[in-house]
Image (cartoon, helix red, strand yellow):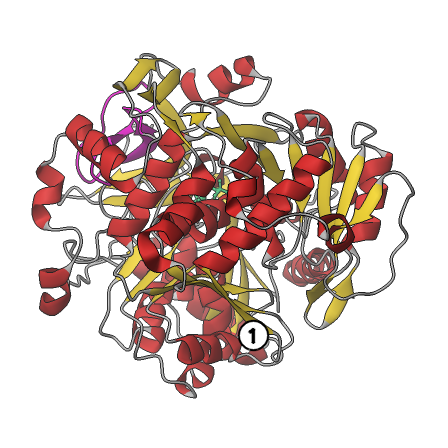
Amino acid sequence: MTTESTNIDALLREERTYPPPPDFAREANAQPDIYRRDPDEFWETEGRERVTWFTPFEQLKQWDPPYAKWYLGGKLNVCYNCVDRHVEAGNGDKIAYHWEGEPADTRRDISYADLQREVTRFANTLRKLGVQRGTPVAIYLGMIPQLPIAMLACTRIGAPHTVVFGGFSAESLAARMNDMKCQILITQDEALRRGRPVSLKSISDEAMAAASGVETCVVVRRTGTEVAMTDGRDVFYDEAAADQSDDPASCPCEPMDAEDLLFLMYTSGTTATPKGIVHTTGGYLVGTSTTHHYIFDIKPDTVYWCAADIGWITGHSYIVYGPLCNGVTSVLYEGTPDFPDKDRWWDIVQRYGVTVLYTAPTAIRSHMKWGPEYAQRHDLSTLRVLGTVGEPINPEAWIWYRDHIGGGRIPVVDTWWQTETGQILITPLPGVTTLKPGSATKPFPGVEAAVYDEQGNEVGPGGGGYLVLTAPYPAMLRGIFNDPQRYQETYWSKYPGGVYFVGDGARIDDDGDFWLLGRVDDVMNVSGHRISTIEVESALVDHQDVAEAAVCGRADAQTGQAIVAYVSLKGGQEGTPDKLAELRDHVGRKIGKIAAPANIVFTPDLPKTRSGKIMRRLLRDVAENRSLGDTTTLADPDVVNEIKDRATAEAAKEE
Ligand code: WT7
């Protein structure tokens, strides 16, 4: 092969296919003809049917690249759609959330009527504390009922929020509050993590010291531990709320414009400053509720569990707004999957009769590592759809999930989207799509995606390139808060003509199915061949002894880049030279010799962010013998030092 490759070479071929189970297909919300619907007709009809408008919209969309507006002229309220209208329709007794605290004996069932009362009281309390339509509110809470309640209370009165994940540092919290100019912060005394208390209040104090615009801090009591309170600034929620009405009529839902700001969600990019991704009201609610309905095949008796944290976009769209808009019963779980034991999730699935489970590949790989015996202790037969999101899923993890959690009988939907997109965009529909492990398959109805080469030509079937979105869709970001230039540069400058640059590599196969290849900066170039880290990782994880693998490139005089793999073996096995040779060989067989790692470092753990993403940047630093960059976002900073030691020892052996 002598032609210089400008496309991503997609070498890994996965041949297994799984058509939808016939009984499921017959009853499914989405039928094959859904793909024949015209995008405008689709979003127009869904916009009318899935959401209740106070004033109907007059125009479906306005596309003035890079700015889109949807459902122009429409007035609605998110809280009304997520709560009040279900009570008015006679479903007040239906459970909105089965809340399960981390201590196994703390549980609470919250009906839609309960939710309506609690949200009203919270909204009245915020108003009493000076929050009005348009006042920016920061929320720094763990997975307790008051988190969705506080978000809904904001939407009830038209106050935009930013929820900051409870695992973020004081510095990150302060940066977000300063950027949004938040005047009020809602937090809790302590959160619980693996049985240990984490003082969110003292982290908040530290953050507020660096965010002087915050005038009021509302403290929800979770553990009841005494915390320092600053006079004139801090109030306990229960005390402030004591004299407030919970009668919904005392706090009517504010009619908002379809394009009013709903929330900001900060996400990191290639620079250190996080971007405040802007999501607005009407399109976001239609986009999330519509995708939720069809992709998870929501039925009146669905018990739905998205095991993400509400502090990320996944939780906003698919724990709070999408599911509540659809009036579904959800599980809300406070804790970690391995507390008190590694079968906690499966105990929850059995006890509540969960029918839909939505989680991330990193969680699935943890369960794989622990072994299927934990799931086997429980009856998981109520499950009928499994979902994943967050990163490309290795085919072996997909198969494990399907077999050991889904009993080998139910669809697994691999859903691709981003903080920026607000809603799922590339995904199977469980009653329609023939599944392929590792493929997110097709753009959702009404969504247009393609794969482009460096020059902006569409890459044909089989070829790899850059994923792009060629048309707007309702929940898309409306900008980066206060930074139109960065918005333009990050997403819209690579290709002209209103084409959104996703930043992910992808290929389309002969059936038109999309395969996500990871972020573009995770792409390696070995001897002129661009190879995605995920493909090598999947090949490694395909080996029976491998639990997890992360791959990156390091500079190599001969080949441009050489592949370095960090591998953790199942059951805590230590690596041996024989195992190393075997793994190289295995990858060589699965993909081709060119993809066989030049180095393999065996390690018990991989460095991950608190959201579970492997930090390949740090692995690259280790591989290239550089001093480590910022490690503050790591869940466990020790892991990377351990890897560094092992890599050095490995290199010494080779010399
Ligand atoms: C990036 C967005 C959307 C909620 C969680 C992540 C990767 C996400 C998939 C998937 C392959 C995926 C992409 C994307 N990603 N889902 N199913 N298959 N990759 O949100 O933090 O904004 O990250 O996550 O690289 O660009 P996020």
Badge 1 density bin: few <14, some 14–19, many ≥20, Cα 10 Å: few
Residue type at numbered disc 1: Thr
The reply, left or right, for residue 443 in relation to residue 554 is left
Report the residue at 73% width, 53% height from top.
Answer: 242
Query: Main structural element of the magenta stretch: helix, strand or loop?
Result: loop
Q: Which residue is mark 1?
A: 576
The reply, left or right, for residue 277 in relation to residue 5 is right
**Is 447 inside the magenta-drawn segment?**
yes
Residue 145 visible in image: yes
Residue behind label 1 places its C-beta within 8 angstroms of ligand 1: no
Task: Find ligand 1 in the image and state its quadrant.
Answer: top left
Q: Which stretch is magenta? A: 444-473
Q: Residue furthest bottom?
A: 377
Q: Quadrant of the C terminus?
A: bottom right
Name above or below for residue 65 compared with residue 294.
Answer: above
Residue 519 visible in image: no
Q: Which residue is more in the foreground, 368 or 92?
A: 92
**Is 173 inside the magenta-drawn segment?**
no
Q: Which residue is more in the foreground, 553 or 354?
A: 354
Q: Position of residue 93 (x, y in %)?
A: 40, 64
Q: Which residue is more in the foreground, 642 or 273?
A: 273
Q: Position of residue 463 (x, y in %)?
A: 23, 37
Report the residue at 48% width, 70% height from top.
Answer: 547
Report the residue at 36% width, 50% height from top.
Answer: 88
Q: Which residue is more in the foreground, 504 or 290?
A: 290
Report the residue at 76% width, 35% height from top.
Answer: 174
Q: Position of residue 66 (x, y in %)?
A: 39, 15
Q: Quadrant of the N terminus?
A: top left
